[in-house]
Image: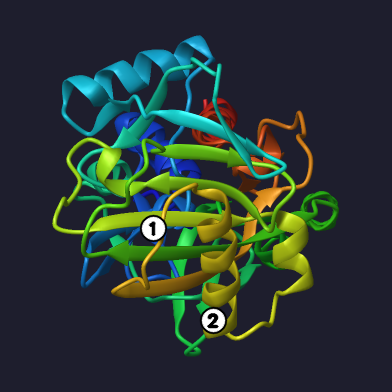
Amino acid sequence: MNASIAIIGTGLAGLSAAQVLSAAGHEVQLFDKSRGSGGRMASKRSDVGSLDLGAQYFTARDRRFVEVVQQWQARGWVAEWTPSLYNSQVGQLSPSPDEQVRWVGSPRMSAITRALLGGLPVHFSCRITEVFRGDQYWTLLDAEGESHGPFSHVLVATPAPQASALLAAAPKLAGAAASVLMEPTWAVALAFDTPLDTRVEGCFVQDSALDWLARDRSKPGRDHSHDTWVLHATSAWSRQHLDLPKEAVIEHLHGAFAEMIGCAVPPPSFTLAHRWLYARPAQAHQWGALADADLGLYACGDWCLSGRVEGAWLSGQDAARRLIEHLA
């Protein structure tokens, strides 16, 4: 019997690869340190409904990704989001001329990865700390000291800094992953019992600690019981305040939001802060995926390409294709 393929990470890149491998008849087993799938496309359940704290929306430019997004739309996993979009510069709000089509998971961002995962075998709350190869097969070691295997191939689909440690058996791949600088992002959610008196539903912010904000209820399929907003700080501000207590982060970003939104902002009835340590790669790469085919070790992720949701999906496709080609 053929040993199955291990995939570490159930964000979009890992699940994109898992779909291709599974469709080609290969047995896969997935591992994720979190309690659910999605990675940075995960949604957080809260007292005010589900919140998209990571990826806010995505666009589709590559023909292959455009086609798959249309399939997702037909299945009800995604919907087009057409927010009333603004720019904020030097404290001035102006309508944004940006007209590209934006997509969101429906009824929450994590709907996409949850649907892609389907019934594939997965180990959640399982942090893989080491990947090592015996004479013929791979074994994974988790943080509890348990080992998993044997596996014929291992595909690492985690953010680059975490991937470099898991790729130690292939120094070239580990070095490439280690060279990728990932930027952090502080995300804050604020909920108000009565809707704020503003037309803004999404805003790109300049000259502020804030980089972006979105009105969650403007996204299709979302909870309307509260007026919930998600704020993202800039990478620079997040890096400078990486270890700031969550209460202080909320206070600061709430203040910046109140200053720029152009209407009265009462105290929120609910607040939440989340630190994305590896939110996005600092620059784009053209690797597609990383592979040591002789060893049977592969890596994929948005950091192998554009840093965008589309990049994550394309990278997963590329890694799976390379693996299948090597087996042929």
Tell me the crowding category of disc 1: few under 14, some 14 to 19, or many 20 or more residues within 10 angstroms, Cα based: many
Q: Position of residue 294 (x, y in %)?
A: 70, 43
- Name the residue: 57% across, 57% down: 259
- Dividing the picture into quadrants, the one containing residue 103 is top left
Q: List the residue tagged with mark 1.
A: 30
- Dividing the picture into quadrants, the one containing residue 265 is bottom left
Q: Position of residue 226 (x, y in %)?
A: 20, 59
Q: Nearer the viewer, residue 129 or 188?
A: 188
Q: Position of residue 319 (x, y in %)?
A: 57, 35
Q: Nearer the viewer, residue 208 or 194?
A: 194
Along the polypeptide, which appears first: circle 2 or circle 1? 1
Amino acid carrying mark 2 in the image: Lys
Q: Position of residue 76 (x, y in %)?
A: 16, 29
Amino acid carrying mark 1 in the image: Leu
- Is the residue 281 above or below the residue 134 in the image? above
- Name the residue: 32% across, 52% down: 196
Side of 61 relative to 130 (left or right): left
Q: Residue furthest front?
A: 264
Q: Which numbered dot is residue 246?
A: 2
State how far apart marks 2 and 1 are (Cα): 32 Å
Q: Which numbered dot is residue 6?
A: none
- Is the residue 250 above or below the residue 233 in the image? below
- Is the residue 44 above or below the residue 38 in the image? below
Tag 1's secondary structure? strand
